[in-house]
């Protein structure tokens, strides 16, 4: 495997799992920084008649994890989530999940990355 790709993967693996509390649903959802393949999955599983809230529901479908890191939803759960969940909740949660790691956070991770 390419040495740079190995470093890129290692940097991603060091990113923290974050938590968002969703009081309306009575749950804590866990998630990690979005990756390119997850973006592709979000697009591929979003219906043709797409609204911003439908797209945001797919973010939750793809990114939401339980405390042990297991995905909480199947790809096909997006329509049900969109139909039954409050759009304001969907939008709020997905915006948090899609937020990029800050430069300060990246610096913290790079400082803990072993030098080769």
Image: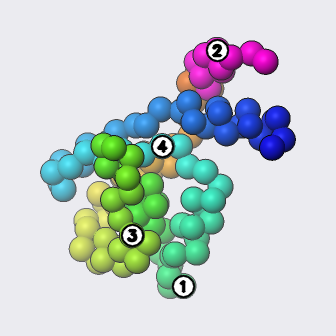
Q: In the rendering, at what x and y percent does residue 68 appear?
A: 33, 44
| Location of residue 83 by image quarter | bottom left
Spatial distance from mark 1 to mark 2, Cα to Cα? 43 Å
Going from the N terminus, do you reach mark 3 or mark 4 first?
Answer: 4
Count every numbered label the image shows and give the total.
Answer: 4
Q: Which mark is residue 48?
A: 1
Residue designated by label 3: 74
Quick check: 66 above or below 105?
below
Asked whether 108 falls inside the magenta stretch, the response is yes
Bin the neighbour count of mark 3 within 10 Å (Cα to Cα): few under 14, some 14-19, many 20 and up.
few
Seen from the viewer's position, the closer of residues 49 and 5 is 5
Image quarter hosting the C terminus: top right
| Sequence order check, earlier mark of 3 and 2 | 3
Disc 3/disc 4 C-alpha distance (Å): 17 Å
Q: Position of residue 32 (x, y in %)?
A: 48, 43
Q: Mark 4 points at which residue?
A: 32
Q: What stretch is highlighted in magenta?
A: 106-116
Point out the frontmost of discs 3 and 1.
3
């Amino acid at each position: 495997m390419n040495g740079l790709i190995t470093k890129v993967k290692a940097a991603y693996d060091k990113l923290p799992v974050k938590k968002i509390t969703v009081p309306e649903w009575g749950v804590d959802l866990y998630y990690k920084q979005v990756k390119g393949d997850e973006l592709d999955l979000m697009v591929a599983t979003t219906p043709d008649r797409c609204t911003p809230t439908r797209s945001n529901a797919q973010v939750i479908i793809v990114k939401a994890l339980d405390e042990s890191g297991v995905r909480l939803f199947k790809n096909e759960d997006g329509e049900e989530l969109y139909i039954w969940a409050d759009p304001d909740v969907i939008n709020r949660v997905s915006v948090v999940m899609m937020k990029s790691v800050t430069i300060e956070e990246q610096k913290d991770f790079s400082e803990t990355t072993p030098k080769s």
